[in-house]
Structures are given as C-alpha cells and as structure tokens.
Amino acid sequence: MWLIVNAGSSSLKLKLFEGEQEVGNVSLTEIGPDGHAAALAEGLARAGIFPHRLTAAAHRVVHGGAGLTRTCRVTPEILREIAACIPLAPLHNPANLAGIQALAALAPDLPQYAAFDTAFHATNPEVATTYALPKAERDRGLRRYGFHGISYAALVRILRGRGELPERLLACHLGNGCSMAAIVNGRSVATTMGYSPLDGLTMGTRSGSIDGNAVLRLAELHGVDRAGRILNRESGLLGLGGHSDLRALLAAGTSEARFALDHFAYWAVRHAGSMVAAMGGLDAVVFTGGIGENDPWMRKEILSGLGFLGVSPDLAANARNETALHDATSRVVILVVPADEERQIALEAQAVRAGEGA
C-alpha cells in the first residue's frame, strides 16, 4: 500500500493507493508549525493504517528547481536539493520538507519518493524559460519554471490512455491557483506561471502577471514581506471583487464582483493566445481543476473568447458539465478532465521503485 502525501504549511492531505486504485484518504487542517508528525500519525490512525503496512510513500513537492526534473527516491542529497529550492518557493517547499521529515521520524525505514510540480515543464525550450537578465542573476536561478506539472502530466496520461491525446493541446488548470500550458505531443513547450506560482492568470488571491516596477513600488511602500503578502494573499479575485471564490462572486451581484469575473476571463483568453502562439496552432482545449471542472459560466466566457481559433462549444453540454463540450462545427476539441494528481504521483513513484528492482 502506497501513501501519497500533500503537505501544506497548515494542512495535510493523505491518500492511500493499492497500485493505481485509491483505497482511502484523509485531510487535516490547522496544523501548527511543528505539528506534521502528530498530524501524520493522526491521519494514518483515522484511515486505520499502521506505518508497517505501507510499502512506500510519495510526496508532492512544489519546486524542484533546475535539477530535480523527474520523480525520484528521497535521499539526503535530494533533501538538500529540495531545501536549496526554498528561496524559489518559500511558501511551499518548507511544508513539503516538513511532510517528508515527519514521515521519516514516524517510519524511519519506509522508502520515500518525491514528485515535483515543476518537472513536467523541464521540456520547455531555453528561450521560453530564460528571463532577459544579466548572467549573474540568471545563475542565481532566476528563470521561468512553471507549476501544476503533476496535474498536466495526469491529464496527458488520461488522454493518451483514451487514445484522445491531440498534437497541440491548450491545458487549463483553473482553481484557486490557475495556469495554462501549451502541450505538443504530450510535452510542455510553454506555460503561464514563471519563477513562482504568482505569474500568469488572475487567481483567487494572487495577482497574476504584474510589471516588475509595480512590485518594486509595493516593496518601497510596504516592505518586501508585506508586498509579498499583498501579491500572493490579498490580490486576484479577492482584491478585485471581495471574494476569492467564483461562486461567491457570481452570487454577490456587485459591480466589483462582475469586474473581477470579467478580469479573470479576459486574462485567461489573453494568456491562452500566448500558449497557442507557442504551439503554432490549436487542436484541443482541456479544462481541469476546481473551476475548470465545475464552473460552466467561466468556461463559456473563456471559450467564447477563443472563437477566432475555431473553438465552438455546445453550450447545453457545457451547462450540464459534460466531459465533451465541442459542437459539431468546432474545429477544436473541447474536453473536461478531472484532476488526478495523487494517482499520478503514485504511478510515477511506483515506476521509479520498480526500476530499482524492488
């Protein structure tokens, strides 16, 4: 039995897999800074699982930097590399490390593996990942990495398994965090997030793309830490409309809420155009994530903005949240694929373990 761990700074999500079959899950919240070990023990107890019954564990790690570009077994060197990426993902990697260390304390002999949200985008060409900065700054790791890679890898796996993987795919992971990826023959060639998960689309509480000098002005006015909180925690839909959740904005009925929704859709279409340009065309649009899977209104708004590309949705199918949303006249396939990140982590880690001869 495999344990899949998604550790946040104050939360812990656990899923159990036998092969690719999910057999249990537990979520815990309001975990203190040093509480991951106790939370893990509690979560396993809730699931009725003792550590000695586990075959191995695998963890979601947000940032693998330039070096960690595939799922791997956790070793002291890998732990050092994940820790070295903390400046690149200060909100995420410390919590991911805490999950690994907490499980090691609870079950010292249990093999552990790590899957990286940045890894799927390692196939982006250098011209797509390089910021036009002096070499000394680029050597510090200042470049585009991209995120939501585990979600995109799962999406590719599912479509390939159905025999439905198109040549040029615009993948839209829309949730509280949002990104798009340009995927050609199953490989990422461009994505909207960059050095951090802040860049790109308007999100629940993140600003999305913003001029660097505007960031410097915020830092000048508020200090670096406060500016970071504004950009990551107080902006996006929340900053524009007073709510970070699309459902609350749709229900609010205020002019500010409507503007926030329009802003989200407008910038999604703008960024989609950039992704299509990177692919040189478009064969399919696929939605995943909480908004992508469950919000017909926002899907309709985004798809209507892509009509110039030959995208033509079946609005009735969209309203019913069906899995295929294109009508008979559409030159582009439109699909909804549920996010399947934990299973993707399990499958990748199991493949690594099998390759070790275990």
Image (tube, rainbow, N blue to C red):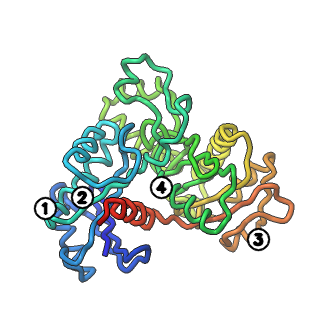
**Which of the numbered marks, if any, corresponds to residue 99?**
2
| x then y, percent, for residue 350 | 37, 65
Q: Residues within 10 Å of mark 4 (few under 14, many from 20)?
A: some
Query: What residue is pinned by disc 1?
Result: 105
Q: Residues within 10 Å of mark 3 (few under 14, many from 20)?
A: few
Kind of residue at disc 2:
Gly
* Callout 4: SS: loop
For image coordinates 18% across by 54% down, the residue present is 33
Q: Quadrant of the C terminus?
A: bottom left
Sequence-wise, which precedes: disc 1 or disc 2? 2
Q: Quadrant of the N terminus?
A: bottom left
User: Residues under labels 4 and 1: Cα distance?
Assistant: 32 Å
For image coordinates 22% across by 62% down, the residue present is 31
* Callout 2: SS: helix
User: Residues under labels 2 and 4: Cα distance?
Assistant: 22 Å
State which mark lies toward you, 4 or 1.
1
Q: Is residue 13 above or below residue 149?
A: below
Sequence-wise, which precedes: disc 4 or disc 1? 1
User: Residues under labels 1 and 2: Cα distance?
Assistant: 10 Å
| x then y, percent, for residue 63 | 36, 45
Q: Residue furthest right?
A: 329
Query: What residue is pinned by disc 3?
Result: 316
Is 333 on the left-hand or right-hand side of 135?
right
Kind of residue at disc 1:
Ala
Sequence-wise, which precedes: disc 2 or disc 3? 2
Kind of residue at disc 3:
Ala
User: Residues under labels 2 and 3: Cα distance?
Assistant: 44 Å
